[in-house]
Image (cartoon, helix red, strand yellow):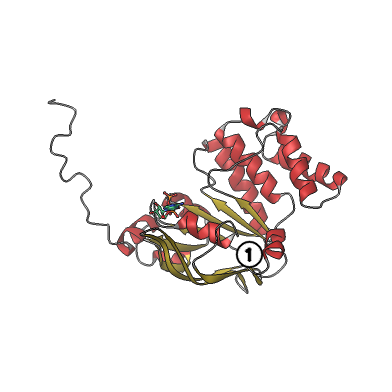
Amino acid sequence: MTQEPGTSAAVRVRDLWKRFGQQVAVAGIDLELPAGRFIGLVGPNGAGKTTTLSMVTGLLRPDRGSVEVVGHDVWRDPAAVKARIGVLPEGLRLFERLSGRELLTYTGRLRGLPGAEVDRRATQLLDVLDLAGSQHKLVVDYSTGMRKKIGLAAALLHNPEVLFLDEPFEGVDPVSAQTIRGVLERYTATGGTVVFSSHVMELVESLCDWVAVMAAGRIRAHGPLAEVRGQAPTLQQAFLELVGARDRDAGAGLDWLGGGAR
Ligand SMILES: Nc1ncnc2c1ncn2[C@@H]1O[C@H](COP(=O)(O)OP(=O)(O)OP(=O)(O)O)[C@@H](O)[C@H]1O
């Protein structure tokens, strides 16, 4: 993990499609995500972010198209890809009856790491993520923020080359968000690539140096943050212009709504 940021692709997606019945969730995506960057995949609810990330990480088979992660085809060589990536999926399912520490031990052994190394890494991750005090608590008793943090620890344990995070800050309080952010910044500073999805533009703008904007199953813009933002004052403004929603009046039609008359 020593290459210069942006010199090679961490992810290459070509002509990716996914349909659920009549609903086209992903409508022909071509995308190259540079290595060593903090990358945000942004878009409104239903844009196709989760479906795209699921296909990129080998969790959902595309109808058409190909995905390469660090040079390996996700669907032809899934084991090579899964060894090199960490994933924090949406609706994270964890082994609820294990403690946080046991979950990391189990994950580390599944990843083929020696026991002593798993212990060493788990202790450090629990400490940095502020989970040391709850490491012997069962995961079922963890809060939303704690679940995200233990999920992140499990995704990082084998030191992946690329980390995929679906809405990692959703439902997380500001203190835990800051902790997660610190760990991710450290990971990218040492050459790791983070790809995370979010519909919170301010968050993406403050964290990412590279963004892909998605709407209605398509990529509307992608590139370095400053390039995608262009002349707009914020990414939010640029995004609204890109998806053509800037002049929509959200209150129109709600003539009965107001705190006064019933
Ligand atoms: N398993 C499924 N079955 C049917 N439709 C689905 C399924 N998964 C996703 N969809 C549909 O595909 C579209 C894209 O959904 P997706 O979850 O990928 O969007 P998203 O950008 O992640 O949205 P959000 O920000 O709300 O999580 C939506 O219209 C959704 O209803």
Q: Residue 22: in sight, yes or no? A: yes
Residue farthest toward the front in the current orientation of the protein: 21
Q: Residue at x 60, y 44 (%)?
A: 180
96 horizontally vs 198: left or right? right
Whether the residue under disc 1 has CB within 8 Å of ligand 1: no
Residue nearer the viewer, 193 or 89: 89
Residue nearer the viewer, 118 or 177: 118
Q: Quadrant of residue 12?
A: bottom right
Q: Residue at x 58, y 43 (%)?
A: 92
Q: Which residue is mark 1?
A: 36
- Label 1 secondary element: loop
Total numbered circles: 1
Q: Residue 124: in sight, yes or no? A: no
On the image, the x and y values in percent for residue 159 come to 73, 55
The amino acid pointed to by label 1 is Gly
On the image, the x and y values in percent for residue 2 come to 72, 67
Image height check: is 64 above or below 42? below
Residue nearer the viewer, 41 or 7: 41
On the image, the x and y values in percent for residue 262 come to 13, 25
The N terminus: image quadrant: bottom right
163 horizontally vs 217: left or right? right
135 horizontally vs 194: left or right? right
Image height check: is 3 above or below 185? below
Image height check: is 137 above or below 149? above
Q: Residues within 10 Å of mark 1 (few under 14, many from 20)?
A: many
Q: Quadrant of residue 227?
A: bottom left
On the image, the x and y values in percent for residue 14 come to 51, 73
Residue nearer the viewer, 138 or 21: 21
